[in-house]
Image (cartoon, coloured by chain):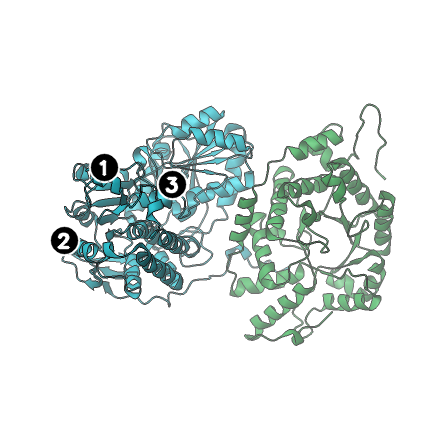
Amino acid sequence: MAIEQATPLAPHSLAPAERAIQLIGGELTEKSLRLHLEGLPGVDAVGLEARAAALGTRSIKTTSKAWALDTIIELIDLTTLEGADTPGKVASLVAKAINPDPSDLTTPCVAAVCVYGDMVPYALEALGTAGGESGIHIAAVATAFPSGRASLPVKIADTRDAVRFGADEIDMVIDRGAFLSGRYGLVFDQIVAVKEACRREDGSSAHLKVILETGELTTYDNVRRASWLAILAGADFIKTSTGKVAPAATLPVTLLMLQVVNDWYRLTGERIGVKPAGGIRTSKDAIKYLVTVAETVGQEWLQRHLFRFGASSLLNDVLLQRQKLTSGHYSGPDYVTVD
Amino acid sequence: MTETIRFLDYAPAPESTAILTLRESYGLFIDGEFSDGHGESFSTISPATEKKIAQISTADASDVDRAVAAARRAYSRTWSKLSGADRGKYLFRIARLVQERARELAVAESLDNGKPIRESRDVDVPLVAAWFFYYAGWADKLDYAGVGPNPRSLGVAAQVIPWNFPLLMLAWKIAPALAAGNTVVIKPAETTPLTALIFAEILQQADLPAGVVNIITGAGDTGSLLVNHPDVNKVAFTGSTAVGRSIARSTAGSGKKLTLELGGKAANIVFDDAPMDQAIEGIVNGIFFNQGHVCCAGSRLLVQENVKDEVVDRLKARLSTLRLGDPLDKNTDIGAINSRAQLDRIRELSDIGEQEGAERWTADCEIPKTGFWFAPTIFTNVSTSHRIAREEVFGPVLSVLSFRTPAEAIAKANNTPYGLSAGIWSSNGSRVLGVADKLRAGVIWANTFNQFDPASPFGGYKESGYGREGGRHGLAAYLTSAARESLGQVAPSSAPIETPAATKKATK
């Protein structure tokens, strides 16, 4: 664990995360982090929403649409996060992830399957040897998902378990209570600690997605600060939502997070991923996200290691649209599989 | 992943022109029906393809006489005798018909003007309907228009409108005039008469009494005949400052009430605490909306020196994502320049900018082979003495200047003969209000730009003209107070005195 004990000289020293030290410099403290976050330019809500709405009016047709539909599938984290999840349910989801449309084997496979930590072994088993070929990752939610209300040792244990089981990616939640009460340092240190817990014995690391739960942060200014905070602490991805809180992902929030990621790229040359999750159910909506990504950070972000959709019902709608594009007519829900 | 496709090239998504039923030639719309003009007809072309759309009549002096006489007849026999509620009914009907035929009007506007269908569909036509709805509501409430009890209409209004927002400017002119009880002779610009002529069909559909609105086409000569006609009581003009001046001169002492909405050279002021991503969008919207053919365009970017490089960098990156091309493609951001003459003017001023030492940057985009096009362009290292910082380019050309303190920003923003609009970008509310208070412009936007609403008055001062359009103020330009009339200060149907709230045209 990387949390340092407070010393009299630096009463609120924070974990020395590499990015934060490079950007903010000197000894990292609660105060220096706060000054940085509060010094970020504000967000004009009306302007942000107007821009998102304008991006939503792009008309994506024919070849562009075909490319978009396949790309959406390739970027989906197919998700089941229910108390009622069983090995059988997870296995069924994995089968769908590998082969989304049994009637059309040219359909690409999804990016990852996202499950609770204890389901990782079943997901891996179901993935079997196909996992290596398809490149499908197993993502696990951790750190007392979805509320994040647990002590740090519990969160770390939760993360380590999932990594030990073989998760490729960890989706952690931030402590929104701490963030909203202004304890940015606490949120920061926890992310650094979880990032550390993502490390495997061989020295490699599970990818860390940091869920901001934007529906609870409420303001766009908060979303921007939380995005910076997560990136500074070492996030590989910033993710909007758990899917358990409404509103989940929205286009303006995702646009804002992409703008932060773009700012980070301009500053450091490093690309951070973005994952809107929850509430994206139709191809039409998902295409708006692709347009927003392409026109904000560029098309190179439309790759699995830089952009994901956290979704479950979205996949079937995309498959229906894809079938329509191929066959020229609409089918119906019985022509795609239930998970 | 499939990387062969450049997603951002978006496959073509053209709006179909099948919805249009155009005639090969259009006459003048006088006294409720189309009739041939006696001047030499001309063709209107699509600036994106240079292809002819239709043949258009020119009104000569006899046609202008006919149109004004029809308007006078309709005024004295019908329109001035109708109750406000009945006038409102017609206006509501027109508004609904505009909505019903919205797609057709949008396609026609983009075809004839060159503006992207995204804008004609989402901005122009919805605002046209909104303007008629808004003033329809006023027609029976004129006692509350602010010109005193029982206000009177003026009589026949002569209106001349520009080519940048052809149908929207028509709505800005006609809606308040009719609501106040006047009749109208209006002349659209010679490069963009199409939607006005389709609008004439809407008037027929709405059963508007003959002669209440007359639409005559032609070039500047026709416009001059119209505004100088002895039997008009009110002149409203939107267009260039030079023409506005000559109209002011020729109508002086004639007793005609006059409103002018002329040019602009708006400052868009970006402070270092601005919401940066939104400010960039606002700058883009401010100058590249409608290819910069906007009288209130934010053509002078004043940016605080400590963030200038960042703003310019971000702006260039953003401009590189703008899509220039077929105005009828739903994904087009920048359409065609309206005419060859305007294109020449933009080129000339841009070349002068370069010669004077400003640094020119142009977005890398493919220019179609036919038609009139000008890629989005930014000039940096511009100083206040450069011509591109002083003259209205009326095209997609932005001059970037910097400032150090709010006082300097205000001084530079005000250092122009124009005074139409301005923009302020800052997260600090009191700074926004403080600066807005000191800017000499008729319309000031804070953390936004180019927003229009029928309830909000629009207009400028200094060389940007006088009078207001929109809102209660816009109505006052077409009314005279009964009290002043009874005092003999204003003769009915010939108001010599400009009221403070005289109309003026807004957007260009």
Write down the chain letter for disc 1: B
Separation of marks 1 and 2 at Cα, in angstroms: 25 Å
* Residue A323 against residue B400 in the figure, above or below: below
Which chain is depicted cyan? B
Rendered residue at 67%/32% (across/down)? A36
**Label drawn at residue B296:** 3
How would you rate the neighbour count of disc 3 (Cα within 10 Å): few for under 14, some for 14-19, many for 20 or more?
Answer: many
Give the mark count.
Answer: 3
Amino acid type assigned to the residue bearing label 3 in the image:
Cys
Rendered residue at 56%/35% (across/down)? B427
Amino acid type assigned to the residue bearing label 2 in the image:
Asp
**Label drawn at residue B497:** 1
How would you rate the neighbour count of disc 1 (Cα within 10 Å): few for under 14, some for 14-19, many for 20 or more?
Answer: some
Amino acid type assigned to the residue bearing label 1 in the image:
Ile
Separation of marks 3 and 1 at Cα, in angstroms: 27 Å
Residue B172, position in %: x, y? 33, 49
Residue B459, position in %: x, y? 35, 40
Q: Secondary structure at mark 1?
A: loop
The residue carrying mark 2 is B65
Determine the colour of chain A: green
Q: Earlier in the sequence, mark 2 or mark 3?
A: 2
Quarter occupied by residue A136: bottom right
Write down the chain letter for disc 3: B
> Quarter holding the C terminus of chain B?
top left
Q: Secondary structure at mark 2?
A: helix
* Residue A126 against residue B168 in the figure, above or below: below
